[in-house]
Image (cartoon, rainbow, N blue to C red):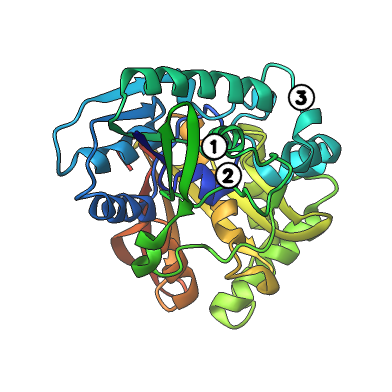
Amino acid sequence: MTEIYLIRHAQAEGNVYRMMQGHWDGNVTDMGQRQIDALAERMRDVKLDAVYTSDLYRARLTASALTRYRAVPVHCSLALREMNMGRWEAKFFGNVSYDEPALCHAFLFDQDRYFIEDGETYDQVGDRAYSFLEEILLAHPNQAVAIVSHGVTLRCLLSRITGLPLQDTEALPISRNTAISRVLWEDGVFQVDYLQDAEHLSPLGDFSWGKTGDLRDVRLDPAADRDYYIACYADAWQSVHGSLEGFEPLVYFAAAKRHLAQAPDAVLRLYHEDRPVGLLDMDPRRGAGAGYGWISLLYLCPEYRNQGYGIQALARAIFLFRALGRRALRLHVAEDNAMALSFYRKAGFHLLSSENGRFGSLLLLEKSLEGPGHA
């Protein structure tokens, strides 16, 4: 009898930022690292003869949990990669679902009809992953093997192993990060011991961002969106300072137009479906010589705060400044803005310095933008 442990990778940036990760190779989050630690303890005393993993960083780092307490060979394979998302690679789910709703519905619920140019179908993912599983079974008779892969790829494998259709998202959902399925193989027959168990994550508590929907973005049109920009900035100013004293709307809007001239995605209107919910204003020039990017304003309407939209907005800044080759992201937060400070600390920012502003102390915060292995 051969034992197979099928394990999804730890929480990665794309999971939190609500992106089509696919082959895009992002970082594992701080919570993802804690999940890896929990997985290592969960699997500490489990006998393993080999580990197979997708070559993508989020899977390889998760596989390190399985070698923490044992010397066991690790094999990387492209066959265990996530689905290739074609033109959707590294796109935000909110934009994709809004711009191409029928295709997005097929991706989620009508897998037989899903097809995207330059990407993979569910059948293609299942074929490559299951074929590789058969090779593993031949190479490890009567042994125990762990396979670390991705949400869609593992669903395709488990669908073929269990006979459950991919359309049955209730019986066969996308598993939680680092969840484990244990499958036994004997005399040409699979037997499922358990599916998508994540009990080892219980001590970590709620590690979600409270997401209730997906954020999409639209480039600010300086000719049409002047009043919207000023209204967002005014509300942000009022909430921080308690009044509009010192608020200079035309100065800030002129700066936003300069930002747009430097990079077309530097100022974004933020939406939940058709409802405008906020604004993101980034200064591409500030910090360029020192290698950091600058957020001038990240604003969400009050009813959209503390629901997971903030981290999705922040992701837009992370992507812009990574594309510009910056090593870090910086911003100012008022010292007494407890809600904002809590959010940015959870998002990985740390304090650089404190300085006196016109209306009180300002804290300078920074977040690393280094690639996989350096977050």
Q: Which residue is mark 3?
A: 115
Label 3 amino acid?
Phe
Q: Which residue is mark 2?
A: 316
* 233 lies above or below 188: below
Task: Tell which tag, 1 or 3, sits nearer the viewer.
Answer: 3
Q: Position of residue 300 (x, y in %)?
A: 65, 64
Q: Is residue 43 toward the left or the right of residue 2 in the image?
A: left
Q: Position of residue 180 (x, y in %)?
A: 42, 48
User: How busy is the neighbourhood of tag 2: few (under 14 within 10 Å), some, or many (20 plus)?
Assistant: many
Q: Which residue is mark 1?
A: 320
Q: How many angstroms separate mark 1 from mark 3 (CA)?
A: 28 Å
Q: How many angstroms separate mark 2 from mark 1 (CA)?
A: 6 Å
Do tag 3 and tag 2 residues touch (Cβ < 8 Å)?
no
Label 1 amino acid?
Leu
Residue nearest the observer in this picture, 91 or 301: 91
User: How busy is the neighbourhood of tag 1: few (under 14 within 10 Å), some, or many (20 plus)?
Assistant: some
